[in-house]
Amino acid sequence: MQNPKRILVAPLNWGLGHATRCIPIIQALLEHGHQPFIASDGVALSLLQKEFPELPSFELPSYKITYAEKGKNFKMKMIWDSPKVLKAMAKEKKAVKRLVKEQGIDGIISDNRLGAYYKKVPCVFITHQLNVLSGNTTWMSSKAHQKIIKKFDACWVPDVAGKPNLTGKLGHLKKSKLPILYLGPLSRFEKMDLPQKYDLMVLLSGPEPQRTLLEEKLFTELQGFEGHILFVKGKIEAQQTTETITLPKGSITLYNFMQSKALQQALNQSEKVLCRSGYTTVMDLAKLEKKAFFIPTPGQYEQEYLAKRIEKQGLVPYCKQEDFTLDQLDRIKDFDGLTQFVSDIDYFDLFALFSKVKENSEPTSTSLST
């Protein structure tokens, strides 16, 4: 066993994907005797607090990320909000520095939190977007993101290095001096051999208002569905709620949210899945080898790219949000579905980074008992 370390795990609060893919990382830290500390904000923090109620957790300044109501305005709103994000990053850096000193943090794992970095301890950045797609400004947004990544001691990409892979040009650079390490796809789930209970599972996530807009559209369109639907809204609230609604030819069971164990079982019990094409969801569905249908978040270039790429490969069909109708689901049968990539992550080697002492570093804890 390595010398136990105190590791701050800080996912971005942008939907639930960054937080959920940190779950296997946190579990691995615990299995290797380390002490994880959780830091985030909003629903990402709430989700991890529910998954790991015994772990210390801290709230970081919010980036206050919301989507434009119309996809065509997505980039303009991101540009408009950028001063707000930069201000939050500056506050985040101060908050992280304070946490490192007060809690004796030995290392940081940031999942896309740009300011979750402190130069005096080893820092890791998790991302599947080495290239940040933004239309005609992709080159600029990618270079800006890579400049931030360069500050970190390692960049962990949750995909495989060669072909075939899940991220395509998002997670692969032709030439790079970045300290990149490919982990293989990350998922909190395991494939299970369970009897089918649901004909369709709807799984929502993502910032508002687009999450609510899709929820409302799908609830209307699915009224004519023949069979049993499990509809998970992705709204992390204090208490779990459930409701069953009878349809003319089936039923919808509604949950505001599900925690990992229940969600894993429900996904394994579902014949097909209707969801966004966020990368964490793609990794989860590949691990479970599911058939699915994707609706990318309007205007989000990354999700649109993934959905188009995966459809072109003959794996999962997709359509734009405004074009979705019930009969679109009939297309699923003509596609192969996602299959898992076998990857064996050596967490012992990964976590060895946190045993290295950086130049000009301040003394931090050398064991969990200090």
Image (cartoon, grey):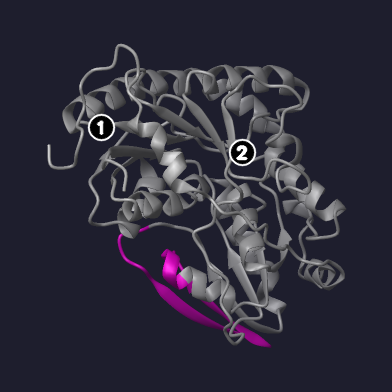
109 left or right of 318?
A: left
Residue occupying the far front of the picture: 1
Q: Which label lies toward us, 2 or 1?
A: 1
Q: Position of residue 196 (x, y in %)?
A: 62, 85
Q: Compared to 322, does 37 lie above or below?
A: above
Nearest the viewer among 168 and 16 is 168
Residue occupying the far top of the picture: 360
For disc 2, the marked residue is: 128
Determine the residue positioned at 60% across, 22% down.
Answer: 178
> Where is residue 363, by image quadrant?
top left
Q: Position of residue 176 (x, y in %)?
A: 68, 21
Mark 2 crowdedness (10 Å alpha carbons): few <14, some 14-19, many ≥20: many
Q: Is residue 280 visible?
A: yes
For disc 1, the marked residue is: 105
Q: Position of residue 289 (x, y in %)?
A: 68, 67
Q: Could you say whether the residue bearing mark 2 is in a helix, strand or loop? A: loop
Q: CA distance from mark 2 to mark 1?
A: 25 Å
Q: Is residue 248 visible?
A: no
| Bounds of the magenta segment | 237-262
Q: Mark 2 or mark 1, which has the lower sequence index?
A: 1
How many numbered marks, from 0 up? 2
Q: Position of residue 225 (x, y in %)?
A: 71, 79
Determine the residue positioned at 53% across, 81% down.
Answer: 245
